[in-house]
């Protein structure tokens, strides 16, 4: 059940384009876990005053700059009208507004140019998602080195919104370890991570206990709420039973050709009904040159945790052999 008093209502205000309004007085239906009449509260990530002021051509300009970033580190100012399909004066006016709102950045060296940063990328992604069914964003429930996680409502159901931030603080490390594609803008690295997680969740759905991908756009993945609690933050009554459930899910994923490659007690959720494995953007396939090493590391991480906390002893080699022998 979602916590009360933490959601912002959002809805598209212009069907012709991606226009986002954060409605701070919207009341959520009782089937989302809120009682009638609950007042919606602000969260710090999104500035509703800014979103109210955004206009169709602001979004159009943001989208044009995004397109230009596929070819330029900083999109030259003189090139932006061609990407945006607006007159020079109109584009200059829109860029001034976007700079004021903090949605783009500008440089004058070695030439005058602009680029989107995460606030602008968030704006574009949320604008698209609201047209498809996203109606509310709630409080932040998790922060990692490569993502920020929020509660939300999509088509009237509770969801998790994961904003990928891969490359924002660890650009060199991420590009070394992950398949980030050829684009080296941070926003595209984050978008690639979101695409990979979406791809994994879709492929695993119905076979492996993992969140269901509800939607995704750019660097944001909308997924079902994982049941229970994070393994690292709870104590289970029957550790052997839960360890067996985790190993079985790793085995099922391996059968489909997927290796998590970053599995630990921090991305396993446990509940009375079983387990769910979350955080899949770094997955590798069985054909990856380091597949055996990464599978072994995943298993070792989990076995080490259960041994340390519950004194549960399993042979790492035998567990890996069991996973591989389908």
Image (cartoon, helix red, strand yellow):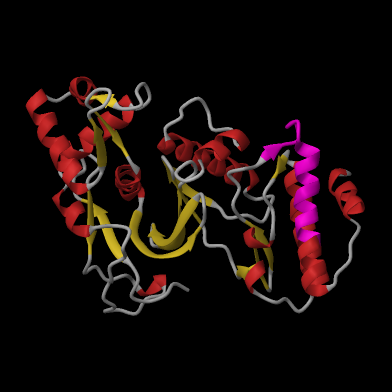
Task: Name the residue: 51% across, 43% down.
Answer: 170
Image: 119 above or below 187: below
Residue 122 shown left or right of residue 306 in the figure = left
User: Is residue 241 in sight in this rendering?
Assistant: no
* Of residues 268 and 159, the one drawn nearer to the viewer in this rendering: 268
Residue 198 shown left or right of residue 258 in the figure = left
Location of the C terminus (image quadrant): top right
Q: Is residue 297 magenta?
A: yes
Provide residue 183's location: percent of width, then percent of height: 46, 27
Examine the image and state in which quarter residue 209 appears: bottom right
Stretch in magenta:
284-303
Image: 161 above or below 227: above
* Of residues 176 and 24, the one drawn nearer to the viewer in this rendering: 176
Provide residue 210's location: percent of width, then percent of height: 63, 54
Q: Is residue 97 magenta?
A: no
Task: Name the residue: 29% across, 46% down.
Answer: 123
* Of residues 113 and 91, the one drawn nearer to the viewer in this rendering: 113
């Amino acid at each position: 059940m979602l916590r009360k008093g933490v959601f912002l209502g959002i809805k598209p205000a212009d069907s012709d384009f991606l226009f986002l309004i954060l409605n701070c007085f919207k009341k959520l239906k009782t089937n989302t876990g809120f009682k009638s009449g609950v007042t919606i509260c602000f969260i710090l990530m999104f500035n509703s005053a800014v979103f109210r002021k955004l206009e169709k051509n602001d979004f159009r300009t943001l989208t044009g700059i995004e397109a230009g970033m596929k070819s330029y580190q900083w999109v030259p100012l003189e090139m932006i009208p061609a990407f945006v399909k607006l007159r020079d004066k109109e584009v200059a006016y829109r860029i001034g507004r976007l700079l004021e709102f903090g949605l783009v950045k500008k440089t004058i060296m070695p030439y005058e140019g602009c680029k989107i940063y995460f606030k602008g990328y968030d704006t574009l992604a949320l604008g698209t998602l609201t047209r498809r069914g996203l109606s509310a964003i709630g409080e932040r429930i998790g922060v990692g080195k490569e993502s920020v996680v929020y509660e939300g409502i999509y088509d009237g159901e509770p969801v998790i919104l994961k904003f990928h931030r891969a490359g924002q603080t660890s650009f060199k490390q991420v590009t070394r370890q992950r398949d980030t594609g050829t684009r080296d803008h941070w926003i595209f690295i984050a978008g690639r991570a979101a695409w990979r997680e979406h791809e994994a969740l879709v492929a695993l759905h119905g076979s492996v206990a993992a969140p269901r991908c509800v939607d995704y756009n750019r660097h944001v993945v909308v997924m079902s709420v994982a049941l229970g609690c994070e393994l690292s933050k709870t104590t289970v009554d029957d550790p052997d039973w839960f360890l067996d459930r985790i190993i079985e899910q790793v085995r099922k994923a391996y059968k489909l050709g997927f290796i998590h490659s970053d599995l630990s007690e921090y991305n396993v959720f446990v509940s009375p009904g079983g387990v769910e494995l979350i955080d899949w953007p770094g997955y590798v396939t069985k054909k990856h040159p380091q597949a055996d090493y990464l599978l072994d590391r995943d298993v070792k991480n989990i076995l080490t945790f259960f041994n340390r906390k519950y004194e549960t002893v399993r042979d790492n080699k035998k567990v890996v052999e069991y996973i591989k022998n389908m």
